[in-house]
Each structure stands twice: as structure tokens, then as C-alpha cells.
Amino acid sequence: NRILRSNPASGISITKINHRSRRGITKENMEKILDHTFKENSEWYLVYLLAYQTGCRSGELFSLAWSDVS
């Protein structure tokens, strides 16, 4: 029931992935997302930060449990 105050990905573009070259979000765009979500005190900041620093996919992150942390 919580509503986002702003779009944390506003102004961010993701390069299209094709079968020959795998590209994702650029370092610069990821840093923009992290900066914006930090400034907005967004609940997504830590999720994005953890994904960026670990390379985990969203499904892997959301399935983490405290028992997985050492």
C-alpha cells in the first residue's frame, strides 16, 4: 500500500541486449540510480546497492534469508 514518491529510474536508459553482446546498465547509470535513491531516502537504495556490489539478480536478492549471511 505504499506509493513511491518518485520514479527511481527516471532518466535512465538500458542498452538493448542482443545475442552477440551482453550489455546491461552502465556504471554511470547505476551510480545515478544509487545517488537518486540515496537522496530520496528510498527503500530501494539498499536493494540496488547490494545488487550492484554483488552482481546478484533480483530473484537471488529477494530470496536471501539471514541464514545465507555469514
Image: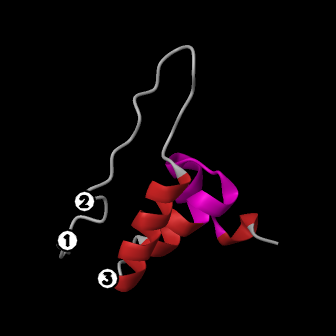
Which residue is drawn at the image coordinates 55% and 68% (left, top)? Answer: 49
Q: Identify the element where label 3 is drawn.
A: loop
Query: Residue at 40% across / 29% down in the picture?
Result: 16
Of callouts 3 and 2, the N-terminal one = 2
Q: Which residues are magenta?
A: 50-65
Tag 2 near tag 1, CB within 8 Å: yes
Q: Is residue 25 left or right of residue 61?
A: left
Assess whether residue 29 is covered by the magenta stretch.
no
Q: Name the element at disc 1.
A: loop
Mark 2 surroundings: few (<14), some (14-19) or many (≥20) residues within 10 A:
few
User: Is residue 38 shown above or below 63?
Assistant: below
Q: Amino acid at mark 2?
A: Ser
Q: Which residue is mark 1?
A: 6
Which of the labelled discs sits on residue 40, or is there none?
A: 3
Seen in the picture, residue 35 relative to 52 is either above or below; the reply is below
Give left or right: position of 31 versus 1.
Answer: right
